[in-house]
Image (cartoon, rainbow, N blue to C red):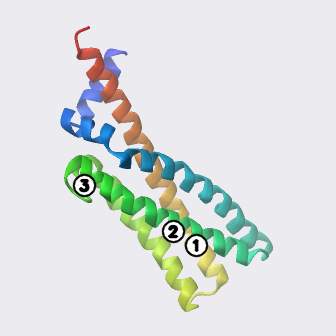
Amino acid sequence: MSEHKKAAAKAVQLYTPEERRRRDETVWTTVQGVLAPLQFLVFLVSLGLVIRYLVTDQGYTAATISIVLKTFVLYTIMVTGAIWEKVVFGKYLFAPAFFWEDVFSMAVIFLHTLYMWALLTGNIGPTGQMLIALAAYATYVVNAGQFLWKLRMARLQGQADAAEVPA
């Protein structure tokens, strides 16, 4: 690993050795590892269905079902992610290592919940519902990017830590 990558990994320090051990030993890490790509797959399908509806004015039911499914997968990953954070960092949310990801996750949850409210109350028509879903999806993409960046930083930190261990 280059000296620059080692320095970058050390500067981040997402996990203490004890936190890394807890992260590696908990089943919740595996749960997150399964749910995250599942959520992304549901998102891609749903995004296509939402765009199809907005462009053609057809497929409202399919788009709606996909958004509801995406929302429930999101709620599941958020609850299990909070449990993971509690196991690893001792806090359900806003642990320093994932503070900004958790803050942005609140916006993601808010917009998905706003969609559910709009759907269930009928206070916002179908096009408005789909636009809320698109806003929710845009925040989800940003949030997913935040987590992918942290995953990369954790890998760099792990490589830097391993490089320091004498053979």
Secondary structure at numbered mark 1 = helix
Between the residue at mark 1 and the residue at mark 2, the CA separation in whole angstroms equals 6 Å
Instruction: Classify 145 as above or below 114.
Output: above
Residue drawn at 25 percent across, 35 percent down: 21
Secondary structure at numbered mark 2 = helix
Reading the image, the residue beneath label 2 is: 72
Reading the image, the residue beneath label 1 is: 68
Question: Residue 152: x and y, percent?
Answer: 41, 35
The amino acid marked with disc number 2 is Phe
Question: Residue 60: x and y, percent?
Answer: 72, 77
Residue drawn at 60 percent across, 79 percent down: 129
Which comes before the other along the chain, label 3 or label 2? 2
Reading the image, the residue beneath label 3 is: 86
> How many numbered marks appear?
3
User: Front-most of 158 and 115?
Assistant: 158
Instruction: Classify 95 as above or below 19.
Output: below
Question: Residue 74: x and y, percent?
Answer: 48, 63
Q: How would you rate the neighbour count of disc 2 (Cα within 10 Å): few for under 14, some for 14-19, many for 20 or more?
A: some
The amino acid marked with disc number 3 is Lys
- The answer to whether 131 appears left or right of 88 in the picture is right
Between the residue at mark 3 and the residue at mark 2, the CA separation in whole angstroms equals 21 Å
